[in-house]
């Protein structure tokens, strides 16, 4: 069942998230251009995801919020690890997150089937992030609490 969110609150959410998406896109490009060697960019990306996570959780978009939090935690782990294979996988997830941001901004216009598919895709990506965290960054402390 779909949760109803006040239209004005959702409009504010979309405006904020679209603004942050531009920053995320720029940081993603910088991460790729620097060949993932500027590890502070991962943390910067995580800080912006944290803002999206907080807003999504506040307005009740909990599936999206949980996904954002898991990805944020992985972003915070990257600078504490030299695992380039893990970083490459994280970059793919960061780019994928941009698509989820776009979809979340349109979620109030999705029909029930589209909303269901969006949630299924997001849960699959959440699982990928959690597996990556355990497999590639096992033992790395850097998660937020």
Image (tube, rainbow, N blue to C red):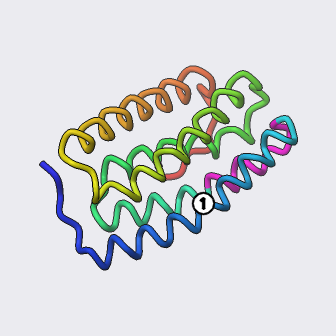
Query: Which of the 4 quarters of the picture holds residue 55?
Result: bottom left
Query: Which of the 4 quarters of the picture holds residue 106?
Result: bottom left
Tell me if residue 40 is in the magenta stretch: yes
User: With 14 as the anchor, is 2 left or right in this view?
Assistant: left
Reading the image, the residue beneath label 1 is 48
Q: Is residue 74 above or below residue 5?
A: above
> Where is residue 17 shown, x and y percent of the image?
50, 64
Tell me if residue 39 is in the magenta stretch: yes
Direction bottom: furthest residue? 8
> Where is residue 72 shown, x and y percent of the image?
55, 48
User: With 40 as the anchor, is 92 left or right in this view?
Assistant: left
> Where is residue 7 shown, x and y percent of the image?
26, 74
Q: Is residue 64 above or below residue 55?
A: above
At x 31% / y 67%, what residue is drawn? Answer: 59
Residue numbers of the magenta segment: 36-46
At x 47% / y 27%, what residue is drawn? Answer: 128
> Where is residue 6 shown, x and y percent of the image?
23, 74
């Amino acid at each position: 069942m779909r949760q109803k969110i006040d239209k004005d609150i959702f409009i504010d959410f979309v405006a904020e998230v679209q603004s942050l998406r531009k920053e995320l896109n720029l940081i993603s490009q910088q991460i790729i251009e620097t060949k993932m060697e500027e590890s502070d960019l991962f943390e910067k990306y995580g800080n912006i995801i944290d803002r999206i996570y907080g807003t999504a959780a506040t307005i009740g978009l909990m599936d999206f919020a949980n996904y954002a939090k898991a990805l944020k935690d992985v972003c915070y782990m990257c600078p504490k690890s030299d695992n380039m294979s893990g970083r490459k996988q994280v970059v793919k997830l960061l780019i994928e997150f941009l698509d989820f941001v776009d979809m979340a901004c349109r979620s109030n216009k999705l029909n029930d089937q589209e909303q269901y598919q969006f949630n299924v895709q997001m849960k699959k990506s959440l699982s990928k992030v959690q597996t990556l965290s355990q497999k590639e960054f096992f033992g790395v402390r850097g998660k937020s609490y």
